[in-house]
Image: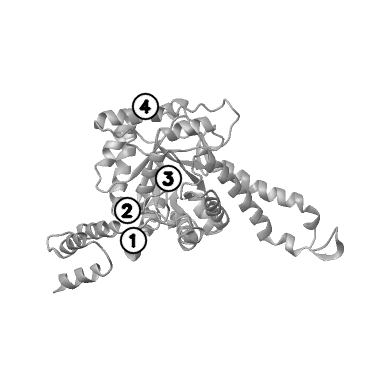
Amino acid sequence: NKDYFFTKKLITMKIPVAALLIASANAFAPSSSLHERFSALEMTATAVETSVFGKLPATVKPGVVTGKALTDLLNHAKNEKFAIPGVNIVGSNSINSCMEAAAKYQGPIMVTFSKGGGQFIAGKTVDNTDDKASIAGCVAGAKHVHEVAKLYGVPVILHTDHCQKAWLPWFDGLLEANEKYFEETGGPLFSSHMLDLSEEPLEENIAICKKYMERMAKINLLLEFELGITGGEEDGVDNSDVDSSRLYTQPEEVWYAYQQLSEVENAAFTCAASFGNVHGVYAPGNVELKPIILHTSQKFIQEKLGTDETKPMKFVFHGGSGSSPEDIKYAIEAGVIKMNIDTDTQWAYWDGIRKYESDNRDYLQRQIGNPDGDDIPNKKFYDPRMALRAGEEAMAERLCKAAEDLNCVDVLN
């Protein structure tokens, strides 16, 4: 009968007999839901999964990481006390620079698209009514990563950055793209998305997050949400004049969010709890970070849950550019598993291009003629790839330094 041949075929694939019989029975039982059948088969596959990376969970492979592999990776980072660089990108050059850096420092990387970054990828002259250019650009960039990420041999997390309430149409368009991709491939296009509703009242913030979490959980997407406000300005989000008291999240707020989102089946989430974070780079003394807030919040949740788990929440660190190594280390000890970097990598990319122009200025003034001769062409110097590559290299170098600060070096093997 069908069960017999199904089981026999799988046995020849060297899957344990006991696991096979369970999977076969669940897969063909009339009362089993489709979700239950897939869960049983996933359990069987996990039983024989082999590790690609010696130091990471077996579910984590080179390329884009989603679903269970993503939560396994983030939990591992939390337990091993390292954080993943989360880098804002604006095109294939900065995307590739991220993955080049990850291959060099031998750790995972998070490639992050913003609404403005997506629009830039699509083209600044394209009509962006209903955010269609921002959506299309992010989707195109994500597909580029899917095509090339495995070539770099590192785990890559595909993420989108701040989405405030007025930008929800952009978020909706991204979810539609994920759902379509899930139907075609069995997995989401992105790994995770961020909702930043921190300007709304707490209850409204989390109610909207919960509504989206229910939709995202069905296709194995992780949600990043924000509590409190990250100061400064970044890519269309300007909180430079916000009341300083709103830069610090309270443990009770973190617990409330944890409770509400945990009610969603298959929910996976991280929390951007503000502890004085500010986007951009400022003179020393102008920003007062208080990562003790993260430690206090973890202890508060632990006591509420009555669990031995000392870090039940996975935190993320926004406004990481310019932060001291001491603050970064203390935040990681509190369960920070990702730190956003944008301002420093933007500067590094520009500085690489600036230096290239400075070093080769005499060869960049005309098409023909340079210090080596009046009739010698300069094409190999003004080829756009030369300056862009200099930017890529400088950005990758800066990310390797960030990985050192985040304890994310040599965490693969």
394 relative to 253, above or below: below
Circle 3 — which element? loop
The crowding category of the residue bearing disc 3, from other C-alpha atoms within 10 Å (few below 14, some 14 to 19, many at least 20), is: many
How many discs appear?
Answer: 4
Eye-nearest disc, 1 or 3? 1
Disc number for residue 182: 1
Residue at 20% of width from left, 63% of height from top? 17
Above or below residue 334? Residue 403 is below
Please report contact status of discs 1 and 3: CB closer than 8 Å, yes or no.
Answer: no
Q: Residues within 10 Å of mark 1 (few under 14, many from 20)?
A: some
Q: Is residue 254 left or right of residue 356?
A: left
Labels 2 & 3 near each other (Cβ < 8 A):
no
Residue carrying label 4: 296
Disc 3 designates what residue? 163
Q: Earlier in the sequence, mark 4 or mark 1?
A: 1
**Mark 2 and mark 1 residues within 8 Å of each other at the beta carbon:** yes
Residues tagged 4 and 1 counted as in contact (Cβ below 8 A):
no
Q: CA distance from mark 2 to mark 1?
A: 9 Å
Residue occupied by mark 2: 220
